Image (cartoon, rainbow, N blue to C red):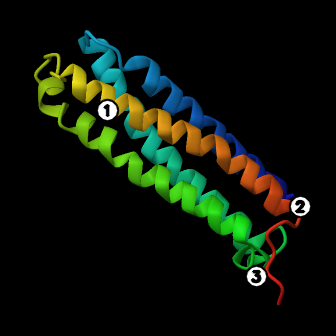
Amino acid sequence: MAYAVAAYLHFVAIFLLFALLVLEHQLLRLPLNFKRARSLFRVDLAFGIVAGVVLITGAARAMHYGKGLDYYLNNSFFHAKIGLFVVVALLSIYPTVTFLKWRPALKAGQIPSISPTKARWVKLVIRIELLALLLIPLLASLMARGFGVKPI
């Protein structure tokens, strides 16, 4: 039963992570207004929290359930999956820093400023994150079916 709950929480967190990133992509359009800027700030915060939940539930599944930690650590698709997750985490720093810089303006009830060039770069990074997140389930599926296992 605990395995099913851990798997369920992991999958829900992954779906939510993707949904939040899509929402960020949709909210970031110019001209920016106060409501969307505040929503972007909050959605990005939620994205960071949910990414942590994905990491914690995934670690719990790998260490305590499933095929055992040795199976995952000896699987190249597992390493690729974790690597892509790290890439998404590193890429997400750019939008997060951008939105964090808006905090003083938002607290003052003002619309934060963002140049069209900066907005395009942030959107591009979000699109790359979405693409990487789309590849992770493929790697997980291959891993779960025994592909990528290193001979012992």
Residue under label 2, please give it: 145
Q: Which of marks 3 and 2 is in front?
A: 2
Look at label 2 and name its amino acid: Arg
Q: Residue 121 carries which label?
A: 1
Residue under label 3, please give it: 70
Q: Is residue 64 left or right of residue 80?
A: right
Look at label 1 and name its amino acid: Trp
Residue in the picture at 25% in, 43% down: 97
Crowd around label 2: few <14 · some 14–19 · many ≥20 (10 Å): few
Q: What element carries label 3?
A: helix
Give 98 or 105, whichever is nearer the viewer.
98
* 123 shown above or below 145: above
Q: What element carries label 2?
A: loop
* 8 shown above or below 67: above
Give 106 or 112, whichever is nearer the viewer.
112
Q: What element carries label 1?
A: helix
Q: Is residue 25 left or right of residue 85?
A: left
Per the model, the C-alpha gap separating discs 1 and 2 is 37 Å
Percent x, y of residue 152: 82, 90
